[in-house]
Image (spheres, rainbow, N blue to C red):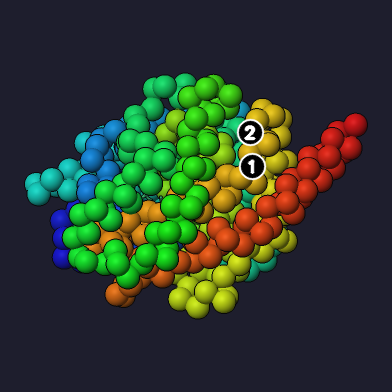
Amino acid sequence: MKRLREIVPHFSFEGEYVGAEVCTDGHINDTFFVYYRVHDKPVRYVLQCINQHVFRDPEGVMANIEAVTRHLRKKVIEQGGDPSRRAMRVIPTVTGYSFFRSVGGEYWRAYDFIEGARTYEQVEDPIHFYHSGRTFGQFQYLLSDFPADTLHETIERFHDTRKRLGDLLNVIETDPKGRAAGVREEIDFILARSHETGVIVDLLAAEEIPLRVTHNDTKLNNVMIDDETGEGICVLDLDTVMPGSALYDFGDAIRFGASTAREDEPNLDLVSLDLELFTAFTQGYLSMAKGFLNRVELDHLAFSVKLMTLETGMRFLTDYIDGDRYFRVERPDHNLDRARTQLKLVADMEAKMMRMEAIIRDVLNDGLKEGA
Ligand code: GN1
Ligand code: MG
């Protein structure tokens, strides 16, 4: 916390400083809540130190975030919404920059905290997940006229699942901690599905599905849900906003939010895909997105759920074998537990694939009836 006292004065926070605490959500950046008082009213800000092992170009990240939040704010205002709740605001430094670079080369940035709303690690009420779907669908919709090619690709080939498979194969080869032999079963499970890893990137390359501005990290805990109405207010964690496929966002949201267990649940018997939650998200998402997705995108929604889950399982397993260098871990084998939940989900998703397809068809057909 000591270093915070040196960082805080560089931001144009309003009021008197009260204190700060660590926020433990998220696997990548260091996050803090900073408390102020403005005319006796408590105010909270979010202060983050960007992880430069993951984000090699923090200035590119902030340029993306600045441009995207500006665009979202403009859209929200045009539509008569409340921009202070519906779009994140980057708090400038006292010298007017979107980030502060410390003497040691750390990059810090700050946001307003939206009060009267919270994020969830797991769905507590399916309606929240419906609203999560609507909020991510709306995010894509509001950015559909944003020039995607002006964004920095801040993590190269982030959701290129075939490349992620290559990363796994490389680390199995070098095996720096001697962990590969202990996870043969998991490796074999992934290898048996290697032919599917290129499906979405190949559709993008063939221009059968368009490149869109996507969020790329659509976990339930990246949506603020209003405490009173249960509605999704806005999307958080814009670090990975980049050109990508809408399928990445749909699939990743389901893999995290529609699981019956936490992402790191060690007891795999508790882990499965909840089809009721799948339905809730699909209804919310398609209520915003069915108007702009093309036929090939719609046809691959269910597949994307499985592919994004397989990809995340591969990433956790890669990091486990690599000695836990990427994702923050809180216990030994944490990344292995995470990898196993993902692979368990993949197997369950395969068993439920036809039912997912049928639900998507029903949701689309109901939508058509409504509009008729
Ligand atoms: C990371 O930091 P967090 O928890 O929002 C990761 C995502 C993974 C996710 C798995 C930049 O997101 O890609 O899906 O963990 N973010 C980055 O929980 O790698
Ligand atoms: Mg996050």
Residue furthest to the left in view is 103
Q: Along the horizontal axis of the image, is 311 left or right of 51? A: right
Q: How many marks?
A: 2
For disc 1, the neighbor class at 10 Å (few under 14, some 14 to 19, many from 20) is: many
Can you say whether 77 is above or below 166 in the image?
above
Whole-percent x and y of residue 95? 21, 36
Disc on res. 22: none
Quadrant of the image containing the N terminus: bottom left
Whole-percent x and y of residue 308? 51, 48
Q: Which residue is mark 1?
A: 301
Can you say whether 25 is above or below 131 in the image?
below
Confirm or deny contact between disc 2 and disc 1 (CB under 8 A).
Answer: yes
x 15%, y 56%: residue:
6
Q: Along the horizontal axis of the image, is 351 left or right of 28? A: right
Q: Is mark 1 within 8 Å of ligand 1?
A: no
Q: In front here: 187 or 32?
A: 187
Can you say whether 192 is above or below 301 in the image?
below
Give the CA distance from mark 2 to mark 1: 6 Å
x 24%, y 53%: residue:
173
Q: Along the horizontal axis of the image, is 325 left or right of 127? A: left
Mark 1: amino acid: Leu
Q: Which residue is mark 2?
A: 297
Circle 1 SS class = helix
x 48%, y 53%: residue:
192
x 39%, y 59%: residue:
187
Mark 2: amino acid: Glu
Can you say whether 347 is above or below 363 in the image?
below
Circle 2 SS class = helix
Quadrant of the image containing the C terminus: top right
